[in-house]
Image (cartoon, rainbow, N blue to C red):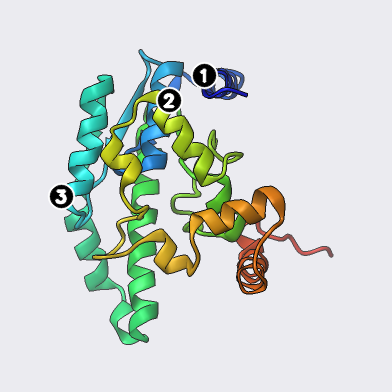
Amino acid sequence: MSAEQLADKLVSWIRDKVSTPGCKGVVVGMSGGLDSSVAAVLCYRAFPQSMFGVLMPCHSSREDEEHALAVVSKFSIPTKTVALDTVFDTLLKALPVETVEPNVSRLAKANLKARLRMLTLYCFANQLKYMVVGAGNRSELSVGYFTKYGDSGVDILPLGGLVKGEVRGLATFLGIPQEIINKPPSAGLWQGQTDEGEMGLSYEELDRYLVTGEASNEVRRRIESMIAASDHKRLPPPVASL
């Protein structure tokens, strides 16, 4: 399937999934990263009159904001900005996250940012009868590289069947700015954080395993361990049988 055919198929899929339950449009968070930029452009193609992107800075890097605005400007995507810095700081004062081990505390804070963004997107969606569109891809979903009830708290995932390399190819076709395509993937959750550094493997290695099943023994063990440990993140909450 060509990139053009893939884009058209995904746009049609978004329209169908949103229109079938009677929703009126879509809202998508724009982080300045590759996946959210691709998702936003596809959404705009699907619903040019009834979608908008939301920028939700929360002690975020200036570069990420500039990249998000570059996509907004190039594709004329309607947007709203909701600064979450103060809300985040207020919650940190009320929560005991500093009383645990430093790495655990850092992760708890990062997940809090993702969950605040989920709340923000659903506030807009509920008011407008829109759907929340997520930007998760197959690579991240497979190994649980997402925040439960955070960036996974969405209604539809148009990129969920594409590995990272396929999303990158689609971004090139759509005309996403090259600096976004080239920069190291990062959720921007803390200074210097990168996806590959946090996962302990490259997207190239992960994509190869998911598509072909091929990997070194070390990489295979790493991936299979991540898949097993994150099963609960991909499934609905278990219900006890009585």
Measured as percent of width and height from the top left, residue 218 is found at 62, 74
Could you give the CA–CA distance between mark 2 and mark 3, rounded to whole angstroms? 26 Å
Going from N to C along the chain, the mark reached first, 2 or 3, is 3
Q: Amino acid at mark 3?
A: Arg
For residue 53, above or below residue 111? above
Q: For this rendering, which residue is in front, 91 or 59?
A: 59
* In this view, the mark in front (1 or 3): 1
Q: For this rendering, which residue is in front, 97 or 29?
A: 29
The structure residue drawn at horizontal position 38% and vertical position 17%, both measured from the top left corner, is: 50
Could you give the CA–CA distance between mark 2 and mark 1, rounded to whole angstroms? 7 Å
- Residue corresponding to mark 1: 4
Q: Amino acid at mark 1?
A: Glu
Q: Amino acid at mark 2?
A: Phe
Q: For this rendering, which residue is in front, 241 or 12?
A: 12
CB within 8 Å, label 2 to label 1: yes
* In this view, the mark in front (2 or 3): 2
How many C-alpha atoms fall within 10 Å of the one at disc 1: few (<14), some, or many (≥20)? few
- Residue corresponding to mark 2: 173
CB within 8 Å, label 2 to label 3: no
